[in-house]
Image: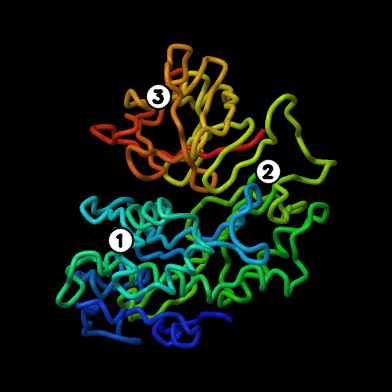
Amino acid sequence: MALPHTKLAALLGFLGVSQLASPALAGAPKTCASTGAAAQLSCHNTTAVTDTCCFNSPGGSLLQTQFWDTAPAVGPADSWTIHGLWPDHCDGTYDSTCDSKRAYTNISAILTAAGDGDLLDYMKTCITGEEFWEHEWGKHGTCVSTLAPACFTSYQPTEEVPYFFNLTVSLFKSLPTYEWLAAAGITPSSTKTYTLAAIQAALSKNHGGEEVYIGCTSSAVEQVYYYFNVRGNAITGEWVPASPDSSDDGGCPSTGVKYLPKGTGTTPPTTTTTTTGGPSPTATGGVFAGKGYLNAVTGGSTKGCLISGGTWYTTGTCATFTATSSGSGFSLSTSKGDCSAASGSLTCASSVESPGVFAAEGSALLNSAAGADDWFADSVPSGSTQGTVYAAEGSHGTTLQLQWQSV
């Protein structure tokens, strides 16, 4: 089902999803003076819009993002799972954790109190765990301008959370990636590969003809992002399909794209790179394993990588990191020793007494200190300069993400 100019309230009713306005919620979304065609479309406004309760800004490019996790398998074998709902800027950049006071850590309790038990049950099948829900709300949900407390009548703390997750799940249900690919003859296989163009065609024709972002790791598809612009408030407005506005090409080859079955986590034998004496190299939602590089991404572009001491370098050879299961996450090490960010900066050395336990979001290394995948540096290093990667923003003016690349 394509979603051109569909009002979300009507969509919810069609899908049989809980209504966005839960009976237990005291407030309601603010009424906007301009609605329908009279409301300006985010990222396409022709005049300045100051009322960010009725116009999504600066996060006017809203992405419904999905995972295909194979090892460990997450969710049903015949369905993608929810990564999140992200309010990006209109140029591929984004804000994160916009209101730390609203970075709630009791999502299940909030949804239960709002009468959204059915929604919560569904989320347990398609979004990985309470901590991940908290991360997605804190990092992305707090940056949706039209979900700010001032945008509700009779606002009570936390009531924007049920709206956000109802919105996320409703969009996800309207975007059945697995079904659309299967209808085009594209199904998971340990031996068969596909062209990127075929995958793109199968999805874009169901997304109003607009392209989608397709992300790969080691030639295997693992993420899909559906872009939208919104006319009016995110809850009551019209969602219009859009094409990606980021320069990130997703890293997929034009041919030989793998779509692996869940639970395998392996590639066809003719293309597998094996690592003697260690686990198979994979990158998954939540866990890295095996050996890989940590590429540095800033401003939507890859600029160098981390070297063996854990510092950022743009002109040399990337260090090979080893990711090993540890507790609820994984540890990292290089030829210099174990890695940790406990001192406030990312360090890999023989002097590290207690290896850090890390987590991941897709292929991004999470920063537990920031509650997001953002890391920080003073600037982008150049020449032979090595940049320290910090866990706290402080006065460090450059934000970067660390992306795992299996080797």
Query: Given the image, on which type of amino acid does mark 2 rest?
Result: Ser
Q: Is mark 1 on a helix, strand or loop?
A: loop
Q: Distance between the residues labelled 3 and 2?
A: 27 Å
- Which residue matches tag 1? 58
Q: Which residue is tagged 3?
A: 387
User: How far from the left and from the top, in percent, is residue 335?
Assistant: 57, 16
Looking at the image, do the residues carrying marks 3 and 2 touch, with CB atoms under 8 Å apart? no
Q: Residue at x 32, y 54 (%)?
A: 138
Left or right, 153 with reference to 355: left
| Mark 2 element type | loop
Choose the circle earlier in sequence order: 1 or 2. Answer: 1
CA–CA distance in space, label 1 to label 2: 33 Å
* Percent x, y of residue 12: 44, 83
Give coordinates of residue 248: x percent, y percent: 53, 50
The one of 140 and 24 positioned closer to us in this rendering: 24
Q: Which of 356 and 10 is in front in this view?
A: 356
- What residue is shown at x 28% (from left), y 53% (from top)? 103
Marking on residue 218: 2
Q: Residues within 10 Å of mark 3 (few under 14, many from 20)?
A: some
What percent of the width, then of the height, locates residue 324? 58, 30
